[in-house]
Amino acid sequence: MRSLAGLWRRSIQARVVTSTIILSALVISLTGWALLRDVAGGLAESRRTATISEARSGFDNAQEQIDAAVETEPATQSQTLTQMVDSLTSSRGAKRTYELVLEGPLESGSTQVPVRSSGAIASGSVPEDLSDKVQNKGGTFWQYSRLGILGSSDHEPGIVVGSQLNVPSTGDTYALYYLFSMAEQQSTLDLVRQALLLGGFAMVLMVGGVAWLVSRQVLNPVRLARRIAERYASGSLEQRMRVSGEDDIARLSTSLNQMAASLQNQIRRLENLSRLQQRFVSDVSHELRTPLTTVRMASDVLHDARKSFDPQTSRAAELLQNELGRFEDLLSDLLDLSRFDAGAAQLDLETIDLAEIARGAVDDPQLARKGINVVLVNTDQPAIVEADIRRIDRIVRNLLTNAAKYGGSDRVEIEVQQNAGCVSFAVRDFGLGLSGDENLRVFDRFWRADPARTQGGTGLGLPISKEDAELHGGTLKAWGKPGEGSEFVLTIPKPGGSPQPPAIVSVFA
């Protein structure tokens, strides 16, 4: 069942063919039912008209024979009626399609009347409703019925036509019934039904085959386009579709080929531009090392001798020292980002305990200088992962620096949670928080919020931390609300595990 459901979801051809077969079967079934009903009605109406006409002729003949008889004795009268029934059934020859039933004489209030018949007709062949009408009313009445033979369980459809007969010499009344078989009409109807079933089944199969062929002609080029598109997605932009003809599929193939060529050109240009940019950043960063070292040495000399300078010169020496520190940090961050962009970043994995790192974060000097109280949550159990300790320390340091400089909170909460697949390390403050736009842009390079993030820094700490987390196969996510604080959650997978779902669900998420 699952395989059929999967085939239905994945295959347009299966849905088209199945839907066509179902709808065709429904239409053919309704059409066949209507035709069969019309044929059955026509056969029944034709047979009914003929039987009523023949029965009326028989009633008239029977009444004439009774009128011609002058017997008044019951025994003689009974013999005359029996001879009449025999004459009516024998006068039509051996091919007659009816039987006769004679009831009577009918007495008012009597429920049991003598019955004579031309054959071994089973009781119940004459419907009670019809019998009541014939006995109580004058005229000719008819009704469909099931005719049965004594000693047999088979019944066949038929029409029963009845009328009263009056005996003038005695004043008695009899009920005469003609029982016409409709076996021939039923046989014809069965033949028509079988022909409709076989023809409808064959029609459904042919329609399904046509739908399969047509959908195959349409979908084969689409499937080829899908395979080519999958190759485009995997980076094989040199693939091209074969164009044949001038129809819509050919124009689609041409458009896909043009799109692939355009994408290939654009990607090549972007790759060249990216390589030039990476080379430029790397070259500039390396070239700046030597002059920066010289300037750093001169700045250190000036900074050490600042007490002998006048106040303005001393302040300038301090500013120079601070800005050189920021410049060195920026240069180091740019080199790291160039390695990430070039795919050259490597991990030096070892076994580390994130709970131990969380406990060590209590003594972070930046938090101590700000007078921030650190609260540890669930750090008493080991949380072991395989990671690069240098990069993990950098992520934690950046998160704590971010909370100290920009959080605006006197309390920072560090939480460690784990499950079978991953370990999460969360740093939460209860200060300024993040708005909806800031939640999305906080990991953008060189981005700072206003006014909470104008206190120096390079604007690359969190982007580098996110790159470090993804290099480990993990994630670094941020949530927050204005005035309620913000939370950064680092998730690192355990060996053989997965960072999803995260072990910590933020109250801001």
Image: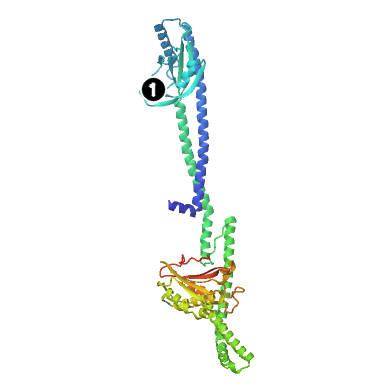
Residue 382 lies, in percent from the top left, at 40, 72
Question: Tag 1: Cα neighbours inside 10 Å, few (<14), some, or many (≥20)?
Answer: some
Q: In this orientation, which residue lies closer to the viewer: 421 or 184?
A: 421
Q: In this orientation, which residue lies closer to the viewer: 294 or 267?
A: 294
Color theme of the render: rainbow
**Secondary element at image label 1:** loop
Reply above or below: 73 against 211: above
Q: Is residue 288 left or right of residue 504?
A: right
**Residue that lies at the very extreme toward the left in this rendered image:** 151
Q: State how many labels appear.
A: 1
Reply above or below: 284 against 436: below
Give the quarter of the image for residue 276. bottom right
> Which residue lies at the image location 39% right of the left edge and 26% below the top edge?
154
The residue type indicated by label 1 comes to Ile
Task: Say whether residue 229 is visible.
Answer: yes
Task: Say whether residue 470 is visible.
Answer: no
Residue 20 lies, in percent from the top left, at 51, 46
Reply above or below: 294 against 69: below
**Residue that lies at the very extreme toward the bottom in this rendered image:** 308
Q: Which residue is mark 1?
A: 149
> Which residue lies at the image location 52% right of the left edge and 25% below the top edge?
45
Residue 391 lies, in percent from the top left, at 47, 77
Q: In this orientation, which residue lies closer to the viewer: 485 or 60?
A: 485
Give the quarter of the image for residue 297. bottom right
Q: Is residue 186 left or right of residue 255?
A: left
Residue 480 lies, in percent from the top left, at 55, 68
